[in-house]
Amino acid sequence: MTLRVTRRQFFKLGAAGMATSSMAMMGFAPEPAVASIRHFKLTGAKITRSNCTYCSVGCGVLLYSRGDAAINVVDDIYHVEGDPDHPVSRGSLCPKGAGLLDYIQSDSRLRYPQVREPGSDEWRRISWDEAFDRIARHMKDDRDANFVTDDEDGNSVNRWTTTGMLAASASTNETAYLTHKVVRSLGMVAFDNQARV
Amino acid sequence: MSLAKTDPPLQRYSVWNRLNHWLVAISFVLLVLSGLPFFHPFFWSLTALFGGPTMTRILHPYIGLFMTLMFLVMAVAFFKESLIKRRDLQWLRQIRDVLANRDERLPPVGKNNAGQKLVYWLMLGCIVLLLVTGLLIWQPYFAGAVPITLRRLASLAHAFVAFLAILTLIIHVYSGIWVKGSFQAMVRGRVSWAWARHHHGLWYEEEREKARQQRAIRRRHDTPTNRQESP
Amino acid sequence: MRGDQINLQNVIARSATQEPSPQERSGGVERVTKLIDVSRCIGCKACQVACAEWNDLRDEVGNNEGVYDNPLDLTPDTWQVMRFDEHEDEQGNLEWLIRKDNCMHCAEPGCLEACPAPGAIVQYANGIVDFNSEHCIGCGYCVSGCPFDVPRISKKDHKAYKCTLCSDRVFHGLEPACVKSCPTGSIMFGTREEMLDLAETRTSFLKGRGFDNAGVYNPEGVDGTHVIYVLQHADRPGLYSHLPEDPRISPLVDAWKGVTKPLASVAIGISALTGFVHYVTAGPKEHGEEDEAAVREDDAREREREERP
Amino acid sequence: MTNHWVDIRNADLIIVMGGNPAEAHPVGFRWVMEAREHNDARLVVVDPRFNRTAAVADDYAEIRTGTDIAFLGGLIHYLIENDRIQRDYVRAYTDASLIVSPEFGFEDGLFTGYDADSGEYDKASWQYEYDDEGHARRDASLEHPRCVFQLMRRHYSRYTLDVVNSVCGTPREKIQRVWDAIAETAAPDKTMTFLYALGWTQHSIGSQIIRTAAIVQLLLGNMGMRGGGVNALRGHSNIQGLTDLGLLSNLLPGYLTLPRSDEQDYEEYILERARPPLVPDEVSYWRHYERFHVSLMKAWFGAAAREENDWCYDWLPKLGTPIYDILHTFERMHQGEVNGYICQGFNPLAAFPHKAKITASLSRLKFLVVIDPLRTETAEFWKNHGDYHDVDPAEIDTEVFRLPTTCFAEEDGTIVNSSRWLQWFWAAAPPPGEARADTAIMAGIFLRLQQLYREEGGAFADPLLNLHWPYRRPDEPSPEELAREYNGWALEDVRDEERNLVIRAGEQVEDFGMLRADGSTACGCWLFAGCWTEGGNQMVRRDNSDPYGTGQTLGWAWSWPANRRILYNRASARPDGTPWAPGKAVVWWNGQRWVGNDVPDFPPTSAPDDGQAPFIMNQTGRGQLFARDRMNEGPFPEHYEPFETPIANNPLHPDNPLAKHNPGARVFERDRENFGTFEEFPHAATSYRLTEHFHYWTMHNRLNAIAQPEKFVEIGASLAEELGIAKGDRVRVSSKRGYIEAVAVVTKRIRPLQVAGQTVHQVGIPLHWGFLGETKKSYLTNTLTPSVGDANTQTPEYKSFLVRVEKL
């Protein structure tokens, strides 16, 4: 005998079809399409007022850091933005200022003292003590050997010309002042900063 | 008692034909279910059937590729019997008789009637188009490289052709249910001589002719004792 | 601009959602607008960097291709780029036209119309058109839908990304990052009315400086945008790295996403129904007794013929 | 800056020349845009390149690099001959009326007193004519043939439009357009500001270019005015502060100067500097020099500095040569005369001219100390970086120390911006790893040295053994302590002439007027006196209110001198004390004293009738059109060609080879061999900064690397066509000193110029990128630049040199 689909059976089929779709409509209703805004990343950040140290406009910047300087936390700066109070910058920044975060966090930041020995092809990590001791020793040896107290005309000149220094025009006035004070006390004269170039 | 014993005598579709057809059928249904959500949000929740929206987006094209492959195989197998003949046009002219079941008025039909042939060609056309347009908008593989206007055109075409294909499918499925015995034919591959004579007169004649010749051959080699029953 | 806009019910439209979004609470919400005065732009890219910094984006470090533009184009990690154009007029006067290119936040967003994923693209009451990555399925339809070629599909997560107009900042009462950073005041931000007024002021300033065709770019085709330009040559937007003359949602997209969808859906339903009705009325197509009989006759006839010696 | 950032918005005309603020100072540039929008100001750019500033300018004129004196000299000629100067201002506030010594002269490009053999000037004749009291003679009519005005008029009579056009290559009509725009501001109610930067300073004639601009501003009456001034847009964030604090080979804090070897006598040293007025009754404020000097010595050497030992005068090093500038030092280093070098946040390998020479010089050091927050090329000068820096470490015996320091975000302190504002900022996080503050590092090294000298003795140890070191944590002096120290404090009660108590012992001084030469006060930098008073730290002030709407914001931070925002602001008022124009008023005489929207830069009770002139730091009280002996190549700026010039001779003095280049320039014989000729290197090159980067730092920042990832050079379209170069091609740019390779940016923004009858192509070479950091590795631009410096500042000529461009 041949398989016959009676009307009743056909209705069943139809019903099944309906079921699938309506099941989809109701049964598997997907998550409601809610609009969600990205979490506001500055919530709870510690804000520190600072100055951009690239160019001489001296824009005010706000440094946002994670951690509240509590004793058990190492604060970490994760966002930099213009300071709207600053009379010159009024919150705006240039592409360098806007990218300050990647300077502060740069992979090229140095983390500990290093030395490259004569002829060597590599850096070696050293302690601050070793660094200071060796540098001071170098400086003293050179100064003692080459310090000029009197020039050929018999003038008292008290200068040290065989070791020189370049100061940083991006460093603070406090650093600059202390540097100058130290340098002249040693009688150093070959001493400049970026203002020269 | 197993169905096999009572199976109708006349072979209409080979095992491979049937397997092939049902693979196409299943993947086509899956494609419809996974495609509709992108066609209209009303069907969005169907994505739940495929493990979520993104999964649906990912699966749909692969199922599509699979179906296209299967279909082409089938298309080759059914090619000859799907060529449209003059008499098919006559059959189509009398489509009203077809629908009204006034079959006695219809011209005799070969293995496939004009309707089945139309389904064949429509589907062939649709699926080729769907393949091409589908590839053009396939993220993340090809879409990126396709000029935006073409991508827009493809999206439009893909949706429209899919719509056509679905309609064709509905007609196809309905006919399967409507014409008693054809569903069974595609399930078990066999039909009764009466069914064949009614729906596919010419094919019926061919089959009988074949049967006669086979019997003739057998008679030449066989002893009269173990003669078989007639069909 | 107002704090209460953080209320997520203040939504104008959501992608692929039939039922209307809750809108009662949008009453006091001002629409916001970003004004980009190209005549004031020095192309310093502060906005570009501020955008990446705020949104935690770090694109690949590219190459120089012989131009100032970098990155060359929008990417999933670069939501805005500066486009530089050297324009020499008939008199040989040189102009360096620099345009900040990013999402225009259309009032009629093509991306939203094209998006099939419910809630993946949202238009807030303040006008911001925002992508909602959790709901994005990465189909790329928004790309086809956008008249400005803005959205980009990520290689990392296969989701669509673009400028959010810093929706997170705006909803917290702040201006977008690019706006705040802009050193020259080329980028301004405020309510739509304020910005349209300012745009007029800037335009008349430019006319006073000999740019007779100065004007505002706020294309009607997309019912206006929430990012508008002040252009020295508003009559020729094309000068500014091919800014579309008259952007509108492509008719193709309309055809694809517009009425066809419901109509086709209905058509499918109807065709199924028709079958049902036909079955009930015409009944199934069956072979009858006469066929069985005919077959038996054929059998008999043949048997007879074959048994004849 | 004589004025300040926000004040730019008060200008009616902004001339950007020798600078590119939109690119190098975008945020300061905001105030130019404000001036345009709210003051209807015009912005005019004169530059070799149509740069990002030009992109938003009202007018632009191209110019050949290094010819600004010609351009401005022609302007002076035009202003005088067409009487488009502010006569009352010129007569009253400049030295135009002063009569110059008859010995003074100028012939064929050289001033009197030039010795061709030594290549130096004897400046004796560069003086006014003095009467018996040593006061300069005057002719108020400005008619006297030897008065400064007439001499100047004669001097610039040669700078006609044609000459300027042929020297600068700027099209005539453009020159005229710019001159006219500038001339407009001769009106008392109109001001023009000059914004310049290293595009002026980095020439062998840099200082004189700036002098020329100053002369123009004096003629137009734009000095001391709102929206006026000659405004140096300083490069680095605290380059102003380091200059104020005198971290230069010949200076002491507050522009005090180190003695020369021949200045053995303290009295003479002071007399030479405590300058008397050259015009009767003028202020000549430097006459208080000794107060500042003694207070400095007390701050440095404390009790050890006593009147008996001339306040430790012997402890100061005496200069053997006029200046030990960097060119001089590296010349000596190159000859093996320098053994040790310390680089504190400085990257000379990348920043100094003629990289090959710098590398060779550093290789001859015994030890090099680099103190920096970042990896620098200098610290790795011994390392082989392939084509970009090809050296053999094995052959370099320099011992190199690299000490990690904090960056701004990790320290407290102040920097002085270009507006002379001292702004205090705070640390937000600890430094990475073991990094330490520069102060701690300097203290660390110094204390070790001191210890060694105490233990072992050694050469001239007194100064360092007696250095005043009052810090609570000797190994880490705090910024607060140091700030209080450079502000200054009283060691004893200080009383004025009427014996009234001015300030008690131990109190912070309120201003430099309280300083004394008798050792009763100590002050590390007199110019900063007032920044940390008994009222506390003035540099943290954050009142940004602007009651007068002039943008002075006197309550924000603290500005030297004495919190003044506009220098010489007395000149903003007429001799009678009323403002030249209401819209430009800064200070005015109210009958009893000077008042206004800024702190008067003038004795507050000096009535107009007393007739004192506004430029109180000058001996004449007046703006110096005539520089006397203060400039090394002459009292009037004269155009000289760059040392590498694309033309055969100086069009102004074609027949005098001595006057081809600046006769006073800083140049060493051995470097002359490394100068190229235009036959061999036909293209005029200039180097500059881009806005996306800051020197050699930001290439370490991912964000900036993305914005401008790879080294390029800018080539004009016509030159590119000539050489068959398309945008994006790789090119080699060579000079006599080496070559670099980079991507070509072909642009319409650089046009060929017609100079002295020939076509000159200019090539732009950004200075950024190196072989470290996040950006694409590249050659250092200073491989190409020549080792020659300005006559007064010794600043190298980075802005004008010759190259040859080839397609690769």
Image: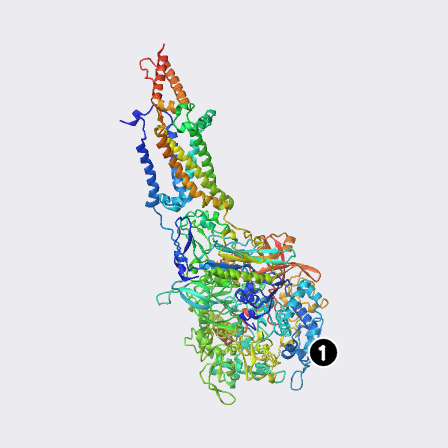
Judge whether C6 appears above or below D297 on screen.
above
Q: Quadrant of residue A76?
A: bottom left
Q: Mark 1 — residue?
A: D145
Judge whether B67 appears above or below D611 on screen.
above
Q: Position of residue D709 (x, y in %)?
A: 52, 56
Residue farthest to the bottom, as pictured: D498
Return the residue nearer the eye: D500 or D119.
Answer: D500
What chain is tagged by disc 1?
D
Q: Position of residue D178 (x, y in %)?
A: 65, 66
- Quadrant location of the N terminus of chain C in the rendered image: bottom left
Q: How dense is the environment of label 1, judged by Cα within 10 Å: few (below 14), some, or many (20 and up)?
A: few
Residue farthest to the left, as pictured: B1
Judge whether D440 appears above or below D753 on screen.
below
Q: Position of residue B28 (x, y in %)?
A: 40, 37
Is residue D701 something that shows in the picture?
A: no
Three-letter code, disc 1: Pro
Residue A28 vs residue D671: left or right? left
What SS does tag 1 mark? Answer: loop
- Quadrant location of the C terminus of chain C in the rendered image: top left
Residue B129 vs residue B229: left or right? right
Q: Position of residue D104 (x, y in %)?
A: 69, 77
How many dots with numbers? Answer: 1
Is residue D741 something that shows in the picture?
A: yes
